[in-house]
Amino acid sequence: MHKNIYCMCETDAFFENDLKIIKDYYMPKEENKKSVSELIYEFLYFYVYEFDTSTMVINIKEKWNESV
C-alpha cells in the first residue's frame, strides 16, 4: 500500500493522511475526561499565571520549553 506524505520545503511540517498512524503515534493513549471549558481554562491559566515570558520560550521544533 502506498502512503502519501506531503512535505513542505525548508520546514519540519508534514501532512500525514493515514488516520491509523495519526491515532497510534500522535494522539494521547488515555481518554480525555475533561470538558472543553476545563481544557481552555487550564490552557489560559498556564499562560497567564505560570508561563514566565522573561525566562521561558516556546520552541515548536523541540519537545520541551527552553530557558532564555
Image (tube, rainbow, N blue to C red):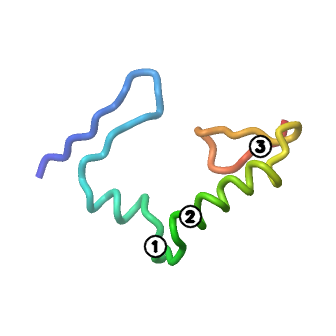
The three-letter code of the residue at mark 1 reads: Lys
The quadrant holding residue 54 is top right
Q: Left or right: where does residue 56 sit relative to residue 23?
A: right
Question: In terms of depth relative to the viewer, which is nearer, 1 or 46?
Answer: 46
Crowding around mark 1 (Cα neighbors within 10 Å: few <14, some 14 to 19, many 20+) is few
Along the polypeptide, which appears first: circle 2 or circle 1?
1
Q: Where is residue 38 in the image (x, y as percent from the top left)?
A: 60, 67
What residue lies at 51% left-to-right and 78% top-to-bottom?
Answer: 33
Crowding around mark 2 (Cα neighbors within 10 Å: few <14, some 14 to 19, many 20+) is few
Q: Is residue 38 above or below residue 5?
A: below
Along the polypeptide, which appears first: circle 1 or circle 3?
1
Spatial CA distance of label 2 from label 3 is 28 Å
Could you say which disc has been placed on residue 37 in the image? 2
Helix, strand, or loop for circle 3?
Answer: strand
Crowding around mark 3 (Cα neighbors within 10 Å: few <14, some 14 to 19, many 20+) is few
- Residue found at the very far right of the displayed protein: 54
Could you say which disc has been placed on residue 29 in the image? 1
What residue lies at 30% left-to-right and 46% top-to-bottom?
Answer: 16
Write down the residue under mark 3.
Answer: 66
Could you say which disc has been placed on residue 45 in the image? none
